[in-house]
C-alpha cells in the first residue's frame, strides 16, 4: 500500500526521490520521508502528511547527496505521525531502512530487543528491521541483509542504506512489488514503474527471494543463498504521458474516458473471424473437460468482476462457478483438487490476499489462470497461465478501466469456454463477438454528454445514504456502482439483489433516499419494474438506468439515464459507466479528493 523509491548516481538524490514519490501519490499515504547519504552520515527527513509537507520542511535546506531512498506510508503499525513515518533507522542513525508490507514476528523480536535495553523511537514493525540490520552488520552489508531476511517473517519490499558502505543500496522483496531501473552511470529502485519511467524503460522486475545490490555503475542480483542470478531485462512499453492527467482534472476521469481504448486493446488479437481466441491458453476440448468446477477468486472491484464472470461462464459454457473473496478463500478449506480450475483476478497482480489464494489453489492441485493488468506482476509469474488485460496504467485508486477490461475478459472467456465444450449456440456466439466490436464506440457515445449525470450528482451528492438495486447481471454491476460511490464520495452505499427488498431492505427505504436501479436485463425486466414501484411507494427518489428506446422506465422512475441499446450480456460494459460518473461527480460535489480517497490505496499488498 506504500510507495518506495531509490536513487544512486551523480544527480541530487533528493530531487529524484521527491519526484518519484510524487508519481506514486496515487497509492495514497499519510506520511512521507527520504534518507540521503551526505558527507557526515545518513540524513533522514520525514513528516506526517502529504508530500507537499515534506517539500516545505526541506525548502532551502535540501540534501545534496547523490545516493538516497524515499517512502510514502499508509499507517499499519502505529498511527500517522512524524516518528512513525519512514525511513527508519537504528539508534545510531548509521543504518536506514524503508519497507512495504508487514513483519509478522516483529513484536517477538522487539520485546527481545527491549529486554536487552535497546530503545525504539516508533510504533512500527519496520524499525525492528533497522535494529536487526545494525546488530548483524560486521563490515559486510550484504551479509547483514541476508541475516535480517533469515530472521524476519512476513511480507515485504525492503531497501537498505548503510553509512559505512555509502556507495550501494541493497533491496529485496517477498509478496510486495519492487522494480530496479537501469540507467547510464545511475540506477533506480521503485515499488512501481511510474516512479522511474521518466528516467528509464529498462527494468528488472524483482521476484520473491531475489536481492539486488545496486551501485551507480551496475546491478548485481543474487538469491537468498548469495548465488548470482541472471535475469532478463523487462522493457517498459508504455510512455510517461500515460501516467499523466492529459488535461483532465483527475486521473479517475481520464481513465473513465480511456475505456474505449482499453477495451480495444484488450480485444486486440483475441477476435478472429467472429470467434474468440486466447493464444496464451491454447486449450482444446479435452483439456477443458478435466474441470468440473471453476473458482473465481479476487478482492474488491476485481471480485465484482468475478461475479459478472460467474454469470457469463455458467450461462454461456454451462460450467458451475463459485466466486470467493480472496481473504476468505484460503482460510475456509476450499474443496479444490486437480479437477478444479481457479481464476485469480487482480488489477495490479500484486494483491496479497489474491496471491495467497493462488498459492493455496496450486498447493491443492488446481490449474490456475491469472487475469491481471500488469505484465511481470506476481500473479502473472506464478499462475500456470495468464490473461492480460491491456487497460494501460491505472493511477486513480478507484478502479474504472481495469474493471471494464476485467469483465470484458470474463465475457470473452465465457464465449471461449462455451465454444470449446460445445455448450454455446454458434449464432449467439457470433452475435456476441460482433457486439463486442461495437462496444468501444458505444461507450464513446456515452461520455460525449454527461451533463445529466452532473445534475443528478449535484442533486443527490449531499445524501448520506444511497441504495443500488438490480437483478442478475444488473445486480453484479450494482455492487461495483455502490463500491465506487463509497470509495470516493464517502456516501454510505449498499447494493442489493432487487428481489431481496422484501426480506429486510425495505425498512431502510425512506422519503428522498436515492435508489439507483439498473434495468437492462430484459428477461427479468418486469420484476425490476415491480421493485421500482416498491421503493417509490416509500417515497424514495429513483434514478434508473436502462436502454435507449425504453418508453416504460420513465413512467416509474424519477430520472432515467439511457445507455445505448445492446444485448444483455454486453450491457454491463455500458451500464457501469454512468455509475462511475455518478460517483465521480458526487465526490466533486462533496469536495472529496477523488484520486486519493482516505484510508485506501491502489495496490493492497498487506493482509
Image (tube, rainbow, N blue to C red):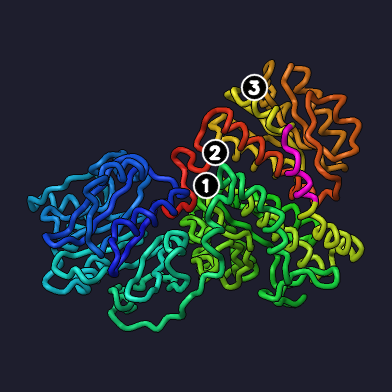
* Region rendered in magenta: 442-451
- Assess disc 1: are there few (<14), some (14-19) or many (≥20) residues with their C-alpha within 10 Å of its C-alpha: many
**Residue 216 position in % (x across, y down):** 29, 74
Nearer the N terminus, badge 2 or badge 3?
2
Residue closer to the observer: 242 or 485: 242
Judging by the rendered image, the residue that carries numbered circle 3 is 508
Relative to residue 232, is residue 134 drawn left or right?
left
Q: Marks 1 and 2, Cα distance to the nearest angstrom?
A: 9 Å
Q: Marks 2 and 3, Cα distance to the nearest angstrom?
A: 21 Å
Asked if 296 appears above or below 283 in the picture, the reply is: above
Judging by the rendered image, the residue that carries numbered circle 1 is 397
Residue 324, disc: none
Q: Say what secondary structure mark 3 lies in.
A: helix
Q: Are marks 1 and 2 in contact (CB under 8 Å)?
A: yes
Q: Magenta part mainly helix, strand or loop?
A: helix
Q: Say what secondary structure mark 2 lies in.
A: helix
Residue 487, disc: 2
**Residue 468 position in % (x across, y down):** 68, 33
**Residue 226 position in % (x across, y down):** 28, 80
- Assess disc 2: are there few (<14), some (14-19) or many (≥20) residues with their C-alpha within 10 Å of its C-alpha: many
Amino acid at each position: 500500500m506504500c510507495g518506495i523509491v531509490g536513487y544512486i548516481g551523480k544527480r541530487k538524490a533528493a530531487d529524484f526521490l521527491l519526484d518519484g514519490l510524487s508519481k506514486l501519490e496515487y497509492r495514497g499515504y499519510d506520511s512521507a520521508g527520504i534518507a540521503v547519504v551526505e558527507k557526515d552520515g545518513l540524513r533522514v527527513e520525514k513528516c506526517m502528511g502529504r508530500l507537499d509537507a515534506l517539500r516545505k520542511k526541506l525548502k532551502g535546506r535540501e540534501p545534496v547527496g547523490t545516493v538516497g531512498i524515499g517512502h510514502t506510508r499508509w499507517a499499519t503499525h502505529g498511527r500517522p505521525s512524524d516518528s512513525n513515518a519512514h525511513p527508519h533507522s537504528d539508534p545510531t542513525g548509521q543504518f536506514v531502512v524503508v519497507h512495504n508490507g508487514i513483519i509478522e514476528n516483529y513484536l517477538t523480536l522487539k520485546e527481545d530487543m527491549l529486554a536487552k535495553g535497546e530503545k525504539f523511537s516508533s510504533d512500527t514493525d519496520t524499525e525492528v528491521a533497522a535494529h536487526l540490520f545494525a546488530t548483524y552488520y560486521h563490515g559486510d552489508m550484504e551479509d547483514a541483509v541476508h541475516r535480517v531476511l533469515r530472521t524476519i517473517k512476513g511480507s515485504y519490499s525492503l531497501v537498505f542504506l548503510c553509512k559505512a558502505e555509502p556507495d550501494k543500496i541493497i533491496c529485496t522483496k517477498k509478496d510486495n512489488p519492487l522494480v530496479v531501473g537501469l540507467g547510464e552511470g545511475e540506477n533506480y529502485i521503485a515499488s512501481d514503474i511510474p516512479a522511474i519511467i521518466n528516467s528509464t524503460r529498462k527494468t528488472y522486475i524483482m521476484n520473491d527471494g531475489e536481492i539486488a545490490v545496486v551501485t551507480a555503475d551496475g546491478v548485481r542480483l543474487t538469491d537468498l543463498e548469495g548465488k548470482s542470478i541472471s535475469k532478463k531485462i523487462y522493457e517498459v512499453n508504455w510512455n510517461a504521458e500515460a501516467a499523466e492527467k492529459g488535461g483532465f482534472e483527475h486521473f479517475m476521469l481520464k481513465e473513465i474516458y480511456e475505456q474505449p481504448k482499453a477495451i480495444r486493446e484488450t480485444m486486440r488479437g483475441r477476435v478472429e473471424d467472429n470467434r474468440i481466441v486466447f493464444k496464451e491458453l491454447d486449450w482444446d476440448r479435452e483439456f477443458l473437460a478435466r474441470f468440473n468446477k471453476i473458482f473465481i477468486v479476487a478482492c474488491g472491484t476485481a471480485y465484482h468482476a468475478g461475479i459478472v464472470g460467474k454469470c457469463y461462464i455458467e450461462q454461456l459454457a454451462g460450467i458451475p462457478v463459485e466466486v470467493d473473496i480472496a481473504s476468505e478463500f484460503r482460510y475456509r478449506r476450499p474443496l479444490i483438487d486437480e479437477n478444479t480450475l481457479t481464476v485469480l483476478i487482480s488489477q495490479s497482480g500484486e494483491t496479497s490476499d489474491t496471491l495467497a489464494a493462488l498459492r493455496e489453489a496450486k498447493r491443492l492441485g488446481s490449474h490456475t489462470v491469472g487475469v491481471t493488468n500488469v505484465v511481470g506482476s506476481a500473479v502473472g509469474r506464478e499462475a500456470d497461465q495468464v490473461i492480460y488485460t491491456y487497460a494501460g496504467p491505472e493511477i486513480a485508486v478507484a478502479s474504472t478501466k481495469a474493471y471494464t477490461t476485467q469483465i470484458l475478459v470474463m465475457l470473452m472467456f465465457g464465449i471461449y469456454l462455451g465454444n470449446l465444450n460445445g455448450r454455446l449456440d454458434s449464432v449467439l456466439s457470433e452475435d456476441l463477438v460482433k457486439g463486442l466490436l461495437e462496444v468501444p464506440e458505444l461507450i464513446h457515445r456515452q461520455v460525449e454528454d454527461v451533463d445529466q449525470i452532473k445534475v443528478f450528482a449535484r442533486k443527490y451528492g449531499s445524501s448520506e445514504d444511497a441504495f443500488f438495486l438490480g437483478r442478475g447481471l444488473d445486480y453484479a454491476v450494482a455492487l461495483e456502482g455502490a463500491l465506487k460511490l463509497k470509495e470516493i464520495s464517502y456516501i454510505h452505499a449498499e447494493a442489493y439483489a432487487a428481489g431481496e427488498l422484501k426480506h429486510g431492505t425495505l425498512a431502510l427505504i425512506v422519503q428522498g433516499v436515492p435508489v439507483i436501479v439498473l434495468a437492462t436485463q430484459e428477461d427479468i425486466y418486469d420484476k425490476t419494474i415491480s421493485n421500482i414501484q416498491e421503493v417509490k411507494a416509500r417515497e424514495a427518489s429513483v434514478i434508473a438506468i436502462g436502454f435507449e428506446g425504453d418508453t416504460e422506465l420513465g413512467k416509474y422512475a424519477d430520472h432515467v439515464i439511457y445507455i445505448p441499446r445492446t444485448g444483455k450480456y454486453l450491457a454491463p460494459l455500458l451500464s457501469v459507466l454512468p455509475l462511475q460518473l455518478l460517483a465521480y461527480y458526487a465526490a466533486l460535489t462533496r469536495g472529496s479528493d477523488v484520486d486519493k480517497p482516505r484510508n485506501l490505496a491502489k495496490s493492497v499488498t498487506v493482509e
